[in-house]
Amino acid sequence: MKRQKILPILLLLISLQSCYKDEYEPQMVIQKTIFDHLNSSMGYSYLTYALQKTDLDDVLNGAGDYTLYAPNNSAFRGFLMREGYSSLDEVPTEALKKILLNHVMTGQIRYRDFKSGYYPTAATSDVNDLPLSMYINQVNMRVTLNGSSRIVQGNVNASNGVIHAVNAVIPIPSLVTFVLADPDLYNLGLALTRDDLSVDFPSILSTKNGSVPAPFTVFAPNNTAFVNFLNELEVERLSSIDEPNLILTLKHHILGEINALSTDLSDNLTLDTMGGEITANIIGGASLTDGNARVSNIVAVDIQADNGVMHIIDKVILPL
C-alpha cells in the first residue's frame, strides 16, 4: 500500500526536476552566420546573389569577425540604374567584388560605438594593395558612410559578426568623395568648387587611376586652416580671394602622378606640386614648408582613395 502512494510522488518529483532543468539550465543557441541572415531575408536577394557570384558568400558564411554594411534590394536597384546596368550579371565580377568588399570591415563595430573618422575597409585601392578608407560620420547617432549611404537598421547579430542595413550602395571613394563627405573639410570643398574657377578641380581629382594626372597626393587643409588663412589675408570670405591666386594656392596642395604615403616622406624632401615646390620634413612630426617659410603640420595621414591618397594639414600652403 505504501509503495502505491510513494510511486506517484516520485513521478511528480522527477517531472518537476525535468521542468526545472528545461526552464533554468542554459540552452545552446546556434546563431546564423552573416550570409545565413541575408539568405533568409527576402529584402536582400540582390546582395545574396552578388555575394554568391563573387564567392564572398563563403567568407561571410565561415569563421571570422566582420562588420557588414548591407544594401537592400532597393539600394541595389538604384545602384544599377545610376551605373547604367540592367542586372547584376552585367557588372564585371571583379568590379562587383570590390564594391562588396567596400561594405566589409574586419572586426565588429556596434552601432553605439561609431565615431566620426576614417576606417579601413576590406577593399583595396587601384593604386596599391592598401585598404580603401571609408569616412564614417556620426552625428546624434545618425551614421553616414562616404557621404551618401546611411545606416537605417543596426546591430543584427550573427555568429561571425554584425550587420548594419544601409539605404544605398556605398561608393568606391575618389579623393573628391572624402572632401565632400568630411565636415572638417567643408571649407576646402567650397574652395575647390567655387563656380568662377577656370580649373575644374573636382573633375581633375576624380580622374581614375591609370589616366594622367592620377594618382594624386592631396594635402587637405581642415576648416580651421581656412579660417586662419582668411584672417592671414585679412579678408572675410573665400569669394574675396581673386581667382588666379586661389587656383595657384589650391594647386600647391596637389601632387600629380604619385601616391605618396607618410612613409615616403623624409627630411628636406622637395615635393613638386601642381603649383610649385614645397618641402617636407618628418623630425618632430610630419610637416610641409612653403616658399614663404610657413609650416603646415600634417595632422592625419594615409587616407587612401581609389585614385590617390590624402593627408590632412592644419595650415593652408601659400604660393610665393
Image (spheres, rainbow, N blue to C red):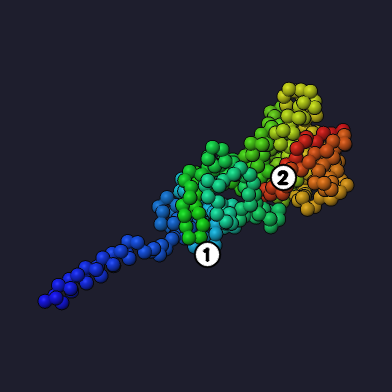
Indicate which disc residue 63 carries: 1
Q: Residue at x 88, y 47 (%)?
A: 268
What is the tally of numbered marks visible in this picture?
2
Secondary structure found at label 2: strand
The residue labelled by disc 2 is: 300
Could you say whether the residue bearing mark 1 is in a helix, strand or loop?
loop
Horizontal and vertical percent position of residue 82: 54, 43
Quarter location, residue 298: top right
Q: Which quadrant holds residue 317?
A: top right
Q: Is residue 205 above or below residue 193?
A: below
Is residue 87 at all visible to an observer of this figure? no
- Foreground: 140 or 318? 140
Evaluate if marks 1 and 2 touch, with contact meaning CB atoms under 8 Å apart: no
- Residue closer to the observer: 27 or 170: 27
Q: Amino acid at mark 2?
A: Ala
Task: Give the class, few, some or many, for how many residues have Cα within 10 Å of label 2's Cα (few <14, many ≥20).
Answer: some
Image position, residue 133 (x, y; %) = 65, 49
Q: Position of residue 177 (x, y in %)?
A: 64, 42
Which residue is located at x 72 percent, y 24 percent?
A: 237
- As drawn, the residue found furthest toward the front would be 2
Quarter of the image for the C terminus: give it: top right
Which quadrant of the rendered structure holds the N terminus?
Answer: bottom left
Mark 1 is surrounded, within 10 Å at the Cα level, by few (under 14), some (14 to 19) or many (20 or more) other residues, namely: few
